[in-house]
Amino acid sequence: MPCNIELRNICQSFQTNDTKVTLFEGLNLTISRGKSYAITGPSGAGKSSLLMLMSGLEEPTSGTGTYVNGEQTKPLPELRSDIGFIFQQFHLLPELTALNNVALPLKLRGDKNAVTKAKHWLEKVGLQHRFDHKPSQLSGGEQQRVAIARALVFEPKFIFADEPTGNLDQKSASEIADILFTCCQENNAGLVAVTHSEVLAERAQHRFSLAEGQLSTQETNILKVASC
Amino acid sequence: MLISNSKLAWHFYQQEFSSSHQRLLRWTQGILLLFIMTLGQTSQSIQAYLNDNLQSLLGADAVLSQSSALTIKQQKELAAITNTIVQTQDIKTTLTHNEHWQRTKLKAVDAQYPLQGQLFTSSSLNDNEVVTQSGPEQGHIWLDARLLAGLSINIGDTLKIANQAFLVARVLHHEPDRLMEGHNVDMRAMINTLDIKSLEFAPELIHYRYLIAGSVSQIKALITWQQENLPASQVHHKQGNHPLALFWKRTENFMGLASVLLFFMAAIAINQLTQVHIKKDQYFSAICMSLGATKSTGIQVSILKWLFGLLLIMPVIVTLSAISHWLIINWLNETFTEIVWQWRLTSMLHSVLAVTTIFAIFHAPVWLSLRNNSVAKLFSNNKQGLSHWLSKLSSLVVLSLVVISYSDNALLTLMMVAAIGFTIVVMILVSWSSLTIGEKLSQSFSGLIPFSLFMMKQRLISKSTQILGVGLCAFLLLFTLMLLKDLGNTMTSYQRQHDGNIIVSQATKPQMQFIENWANEHAIDIRQAKPYMYAKLVAVNSQTLAEFSSKPSDSMATFSHAIRLHWSEVVPKNNKVIDGQWWQNNTENWQQISVEEEVMTDLGLALGDWLTFFIGQQQVKLQIVASHVFQPGAGSITFWVQMPPTALAHIQSAHYSMASIELTQQQETLLPALWQKFPTLRMVSLKEVTERFDSMLAMITKVISGFSLMIIILASVVILASISALESQEKKKNSIIMSFGFTQVTCLKLNVIEWLVTASITAIGAILGTYFSGMLIYQSQFSLKYQPDFIWLSITLAIILSVVTGLGIYASRHSLQSSVKQLMSDT
Ligand SMILES: Nc1ncnc2c1ncn2[C@@H]1O[C@H](COP(=O)(O)OP(=O)(O)O)[C@@H](O)[C@H]1O
Ligand SMILES: [Mg+2]
């Protein structure tokens, strides 16, 4: 059963004062559940804006975005409850313990097994000893692991990660990349990661580069390996 | 360095000028400065006035007053210890001319009058006032200008008093010994002492005053002599207290309390705002430091910025304060005649300096935080741990100290601080326990309410600051409103339902007999008539009254004069005994007395206490055996103290009557004749009484509204400040919730639930706090009986809290305008 996000002929531009900034024009893209995607590109290229469009949080200036789930085709904003986000700054709530941070989306949904599920996910990301630590007592890598667990705990169909390793050293970055890809795979979630990190980008099944309003496909490692 | 820092600070200040944390700080500081400055000016003006007044209007070095003349022997003794003695006599009478009548204070003076100071009169209304060397000659009467107008009489006309003719000779402008009358508005007339004899007023109605000149040591000797020989008389002297000092003391107590409340609210508001200020200034200072500036630059800029903020509001505040002071002085003119507006610069500087220092202490956490700042912290949110609580605690301690030293009633302040402390503890306990229990109980349910409780519990520390801020405001507001309402009610309760439209408050025996006949003759209905005699309370259980109780209260003020003592065999129909036992008929034991309940509590009396009264020329001891209260429905005339009729055989003193009479409109024309016959008959129409109360109520309402307005503005500022302190946290929380796939509607619902929970917790705290402080403060400081009206309290609280919730939700709308996008670009 197909489950896709489809962007067709998307144009996004902003009017600031007198100048009109066009981020991208005539952009076409399909994101499928269960696959992973990496988007690279220089700062200010519009990567984050693209994530917002894909997740239906923002409307494009022109063009259409649709959410295809099996037989049904819905507008993108209806995707809202099926997506999770991971940020460069982690954005955990500082007053809550790791466990409570992860349990948060489930509690909001009224899930009675929130804590059990949250424990399970924290174990999955390797933080079984850190349940009761506050974010301030965790390293950056650990905080990002909590954030990954929090984004996946309510089993969303798609995960959008905006420079998830941007604030981490190389070692943590590759650990995070491991966890992120493995977890999304296991959960059958589509992963879209915006990144500057080669390590991270290389692990994605599909790789795009966004520059000067153009989205171009790049070969990924897997294909390279296959061609060898 | 300083100049460049000032420029930097000025620039920084301008940038922040219209941001909410600066605006709220301006309001807080402005309101408090305005209040303290105006209060300081007014207080100084009144104190100066009272002192001036005492020095210039006593008209003597000491004045001895009592309700009977000194005996020859006493006069001789007095003359032996002092230099000069001048006697004046006062009587309250009603002057009539054609169909006009006016209640008047008639004063008779002897040839030596005035003793000190100057007497001003004029020969006609339009003439200039001139200094006059002595009082009117025999057969002449001088009237003040209002009385001339009130009676429609002219200079040169003849005025008849008790069928004796007087020539209206001069206009009376100013008597130098008017101190005691300074605060009453009676119309005034003056005659010669020799005439008062021929008017044949009942001697016990005449009030005698002796103006005495003497040195400080002679006055001391005089006071000793008076305490031994004339305990029921009153002495005022230049080294002593103004007769209005007690009244003013009470007002100051109230104002002191008001400023304590306002200081607390300002402290809460500033404390909430410092969190925002710390963030902004730390960021700015860290940037400065990353560009090579020193740490002290950051601190200097922050201090200068704060100073600019304060300096900039100063001209506005001074202007507003001068205007308010002027308005208040004008308004006080009714009580303190001839008080003048004057701006006291030193007092102003004093207020400004004191308040600025306090503000600086409140604001100090910002500067302290800059000392611990570093470039490394530029992008990391620095945490507040123990030092956060330490700074809160220290500002609380400083606040208490400041407040204790500021207010001159330490006991009241201590009580208020205790009440506030109690409220804080209650609110901390309630918020902790209710959130814990609520969270535990609701764990098995799903939905937004358990989630809100969970979140609030998790964020207890930051949330409880907000709860405390809002809760203290609700408490202070509720307490103030309750106090003002009850003070207002006390005033109105004096205005009991009258069953007649004319009240005779003092009629001598022959006068009463005449009135009875007169009423019969004209078919006028006398509703009630009750006898009494005048008694001055001098001691309780062999302690003098002053030794026994020093609290200023209404009862106390009244007991410094003679009061009306009633006798009755049975409990009067409009009374009810609530404690002790009324006497048997024809009891042998005549030394018994029943005292009104409010008086008992006011003076701190108990059943079994012995009261010593000075009645007529003798001392009488009576033991309290019962306590009674007024019971409506059977007439309005009631007495504070009552004794068995058998006591009359042992007490020689004049008997008077109080009566209420129902008069039709047409019958009112009969009154002038009655007064012509008995000028000293004390009789007021109900209309007059209600008018007097209406004006008093209007005054109290003005004070209440003015003060409540100030508290309400400050309370709103506190709430806004506490919201703005948490705004960035809230914003982030909302964005994160939205990143889980929820919409703004969910955030709004969560917000509403949170505010409702906050409001309920604060409601409990405010009600308990108000109840506690009522019990603590009412009786001891305002001599009010504390009978909390829980329905009124709940309704008021519900209104306050729905406004709080509404305001809270409205003010948090900024934090609802958050989006996931902000989390992506946010650093
Ligand atoms: N709402 C907006 N209004 C105006 N300009 C915007 C808006 N959102 C993004 N931009 C601009 O679009 C550009 C791309 O932003 P962004 O998507 O954050 O880039 P990236 O994530 O690739 O660094 C930036 O120059 C930014 O200023
Ligand atoms: Mg970006």
Image: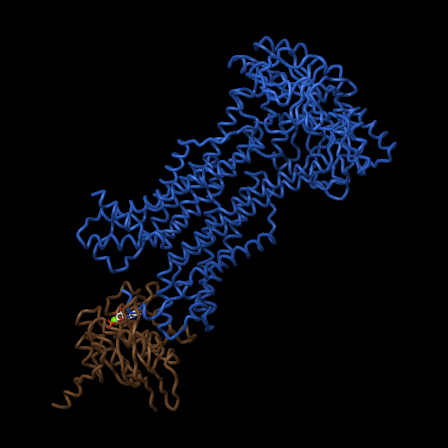
Q: Colour of chain B?
A: blue
Q: Colour of chain A?
A: brown
Q: Which x, y percent locates residue B369? A: 28, 50
B558 vs A162, left or right, is right
Q: Residue at x 24, y 73 (%)?
A: A164
Q: Is residue B223 visible?
A: no
A40 vs B257, left or right, is left
Location of residue B74 (image quadrant)? top right
**Quadrant of the frame with the C terminus of chain B:** bottom left
Q: Is residue B145 above or below residue A223?
A: above
Q: Which x, y percent locates residue B198? A: 76, 15
B327 vs A201, left or right, is right
Q: Where on the image, by quarter, is ligand 1?
A: bottom left
**Quadrant of the frame with the N terminus of chain B:** top left
Q: Is residue B576 above or below residue B164?
A: below
| Residue in front for this viewpoint, A136 or B16 | B16
Q: Residue at x 37, y 70 (%)?
A: B737
Location of residue B459 (image quadrant)? bottom left
| Residue in front for this viewpoint, B217 or B375 | B375
